[in-house]
Image (tube, rainbow, N blue to C red):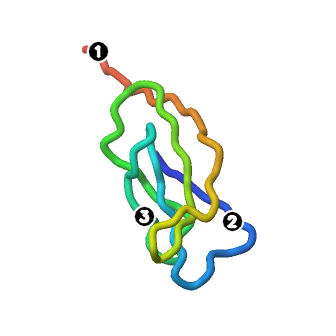
């Protein structure tokens, strides 16, 4: 699953974007990155959100959760 984040204004020095899926942190985006590919997603309904945090880990801003549905394709022989 590819996640893209758009920010206005841009991140300040020392700030980072942390992604959360189903309420659990799944990691920080690399510095300067606004897109991240999430692997190992199980099928079903999920919520994802992004938060901007400072060096101390305090949340400065966060997005509203976005719901997505992940379906795995099955091939019958």
The answer to the question of whether label 3 and label 1 lie on touching residues, with beta carbons closer than 8 A, is: no
Q: Circle 2 — which element?
A: loop
Q: Locate the C terminus by quadrant.
A: top left
Q: Residue at x 58, y 56 (%)?
A: 4
Q: Is residue 69 above or below residue 32?
A: above
Precedes in sequence: disc 2 or disc 1: 2
- In-image side of 64 versus 45 (left or right): right
Q: Is residue 6 above or below residue 14?
A: above
Mark 3 nearby-residue class (10 Å; few <14, some 14–19, many ≥20): some
What residue occupies the far left of the structure in this picture?
Answer: 77
- In-image side of 68 versus 30 (left or right): right
- State the separation of the CA atoms marked 3 and 2: 15 Å
- State the separation of the CA atoms marked 3 and 1: 38 Å
Q: Circle 1 — which element?
A: loop
Could you tell me residue 36's position as x and y percent?
47, 59
Q: Is residue 39 above or below residue 74?
A: below
What residue occupies the far bottom of the structure in this picture?
Answer: 13
- State the separation of the CA atoms marked 2 and 1: 43 Å
Q: Locate the N terminus by quadrant.
A: top left
Q: Residue at x 47, y 77 (%)?
A: 55
- Determine which residue is flagged by label 1: 76
Q: Residue at x 51, y 66 (%)?
A: 58
Could you tell me residue 76's position as x and y percent?
29, 15
- Determine which residue is flagged by label 2: 7
Give the numbered dot on residue 14: none
Could you tell me residue 51's position as x and y percent?
56, 58
Q: Foreground residue, 33 or 50? A: 50
Instruction: Please tell me whether mark 3 or mark 1 is closer to you in this view.
Output: 3
- Determine which residue is flagged by label 3: 28
């Amino acid at each position: 699953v590819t996640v893209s984040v758009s920010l206005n204004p841009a991140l300040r020095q020392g700030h980072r974007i942390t992604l959360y899926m189903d309420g659990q942190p799944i990691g920080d985006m690399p510095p300067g990155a606004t897109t991240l590919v999430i692997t190992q997603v199980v099928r079903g309904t999920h919520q994802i959100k992004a938060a901007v945090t400072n060096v101390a880990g305090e949340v400065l801003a966060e997005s509203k959760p976005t719901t997505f549905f992940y379906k795995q394709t099955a091939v019958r022989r």
